[in-house]
Amino acid sequence: MTKSAMKVGVIFVLLCLTSGGILAFETYRYLHSPITHLQVPPSKLITIPKGAGFNQIVQILAEHGVLDQPNRFRLLAYFRDLMFELKAGEYEVQTSWTPNQMLDHLVEGRSQLYKVTIPEGLTFEETAERFEQAGIGKKENFLLLKDNLSLREMLDITPVVASLEGFLFPETYFFTRNDTEMAILTAMIQQFNQNYPDEYRRKAAEYRMTDYEVVTLASIVEKETGRDQDRPLISAVFHNRLKRKMRLESDPTVIYGIDNFDGNLTRKHLKTPHPYNTYRNFGLPPGPICNPGKASIQSTLYPEKVSFLYFVSRGDGTSYFSSDLKTHNKAVRRYQKKQ
C-alpha cells in the first residue's frame, strides 16, 4: 500500500470516528434534553383518541408544540420497539420531559384522572347526570346499562337484582375521560360489594330479608333523612310497621314512582296507584328508590330497639317520633303548621 493510500485510509477512519462521535453526542443530547424547545406553556393537556396509530399520535404531539423533533422521536420508539404500545387517553404533558419520559408516559397510559363525588341518595339517573356533567360518559349510555344482566350478576347479593338502582355505591371516584360507562358502573358495583360484608348478609337472614330487600329499605331510610342520628330510629319505625302489617306510608317512595315530579306532593299523588305508592300498597316497594350509603344500610340492619310507629319532620332536619297515632297527629299539626 502506498503512503498516499494509507493517508486516505487514516483520513477515512478519522472521519468515521468523528461522524460516529458527533452522532453519539447528538443522540445523547437529544435523549437528555426537553422534548421541545418551542415557546409553549410548561404543561399542556393532550388528548390521544382511541384507535390513533403511532404516526397520528406523533403528529398530534407535534401539532400541539410539545414535540419539535418528531422524526427522532419515531426512531427512538422504533429502536425501543414501542411503536405499537402507546395508549389512548388524556395526558398532562410536561414540556420539560425528555423523549424517553414522554414515551414511557404514553406507554404506561398515565391518563389524566378526574374526581367525581357521588353523594348518598342519588338515583341511577341522577348519578348518570352527575358523570355526564363531569365530562365522563354519556347519560344515555349509562341508562342503556341500567338493566344489563352481566353487571347485575356482578353484585355479590341475593337474589339477582331487577336493575342497578340502589347499587351504585356513593363514594368519591377518579376516572379518565376515556373510561367507558361499563367500566365506571363496574367500579361502583365493586365498591358496593366491598361495603356489603358477610356480616350484613347474616343479619339480613335474621330479619328473614333478602339482601335486595335490605337495600330497598335502606334506600327509603336514606331519602327520609339526612341526619345520621335519626337513621336507626326511622329504620325502627319501618321495621315495626312491617312486623305489624302496616303500610310504610313513605313520601319518597311515592315521589319515585311519579314521572317528571314537580316537587309538589299532593293528596292526589298519595291516592294514585302505582307499584311504589306505599300509602296504598303493603310491604316494601318493588326495589330501591335511590342509591343508599353505608350509614343507611347499617341502620337498616341495626335499628334502634324502640316502639315508634310514626315520625314527622320538624323542619330543621330532625324528626319527631311517636308510638301512637294520636301523638303523631298532634305532632303533625304542630310541625306542619310551623313549616
Image (tube, rainbow, N blue to C red):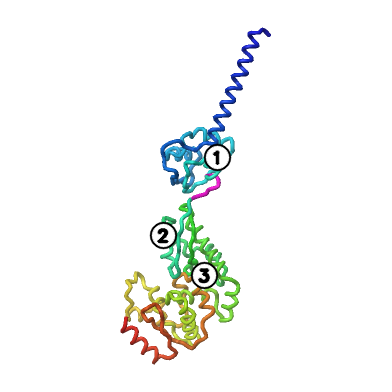
Q: Is residue 61 visible?
A: yes
Q: Position of residue 77 (x, y in %)?
A: 55, 37
Residue 97 drawn above or below residue 124: above
Q: Name the residue located 46 percent from the left edge and 58 percent from the top edge.
A: 115
Amino acid found under the numbered disc labelled 2: Lys
Residue shown at 48% from the left, 48% from the top: 89
Q: Is residue 87 left or right of residue 332?
A: right
Residue at 51% over, 74% down: 297
From this view, report whether residue 94 is shown above or below residue 256: above
Q: Position of residue 218 (x, y in %)?
A: 49, 75
**Label 3 crowd (10 A; few <14 / some 14-19 / many >=20):** many
Tell us which disc is closer to us: 2 or 3.
2
Query: Which residue in the protein does label 3 denote?
Result: 161
Q: In this figure, which residue is indicated by the disc labeled 2?
A: 139
Boundaries of the magenta span: 106-111
List x then y, in percent, for residue 255. 38, 74
Quarter location, residue 329:
bottom left
180, above or below 296, in the image: above
